[in-house]
Image: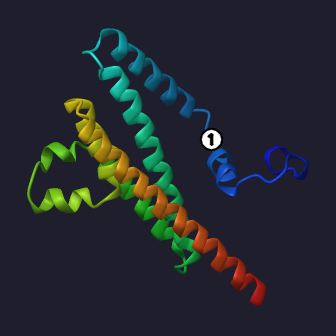
Amino acid sequence: SGLGHASMGHVDPLLLVATHGQHPAALGDLLMGVLGIIFLMVEGPSGMGIRTLLASVLGSIGFFAVFIFSGSLAFFVARGNMLTILIREITLSLCCYPLGKIFPSGTSRLILLLSPAAAISILPLEWIESGTWATFGLAALALFMSLLIALATYTVGVKRFQSVSLVT
């Protein structure tokens, strides 16, 4: 069926996973986000809409990286699905609260910045508010590094799985 048919050539398995579980209710969230960004572009402070749009793209890349990384842990850990669920839920929870405002400095802030939530929501949100390109660069760099780590984990995990499958 569809995406995996051989006549279409090679299809990246990550693309199949990313598009497989799309829920129709997510379209409402997407529509609300797009309308909010359009509203900010028209009525918001100068540049706020564009910064929000770019931060949304950064956040999407960040969640993509978290889902790839957490899903790849099953290649390395027995019963990794529970760890996958834990990492995803913790990341979602940390991204839903204004933790950047709650922990503006100190050790708690440092620990928070080492979590995926920092790259997904805290740094892009700070960039939306500040509008400085240095903050945007920091957020983009953090997300790029997260994505590279996630893809490397996935690649090593798949190779490990294939080599174990060949042996057994």
Q: Which amino acid, by three-letter code, is at mark 1?
A: Gln
Front position in the image: 146 or 71: 146
Horizontal and vertical percent position of residue 79: 54, 77
Q: Quadrant of the C terminus?
A: bottom right
Relative height, residue 63 to residue 90 (above, below) = above
Query: In the visual, does 28 lie left or right of 54?
Result: right
Residue at 47 percent across and 22 percent down: it is 34
Q: Which residue is mark 1?
A: 22
Given the current orientation, which residue lies at the most extreme bottom position?
A: 167
Front position in the image: 31 or 129: 129
Relative height, residue 125 to residue 18 (above, below) = above
Given the current orientation, which residue lies at the most extreme right position?
A: 7
Horizontal and vertical percent position of residue 36: 39, 20
Q: Secondary structure at mark 1?
A: loop
Image quadrant where residue 128 sits = top left
Horizontal and vertical percent position of residue 167: 76, 90
Colour scheme shown: rainbow
Residue at 50 percent across and 50 percent down: it is 64
Image quadrant where residue 89 sits = bottom left
Q: Is residue 96 visible?
A: no
Query: In the visual, does 167 lie left or right of 135?
Result: right
Relative height, residue 51 to residue 151 (above, below) = above
Front position in the image: 22 or 127: 127
Residue at 59 percent across and 73 percent down: it is 157
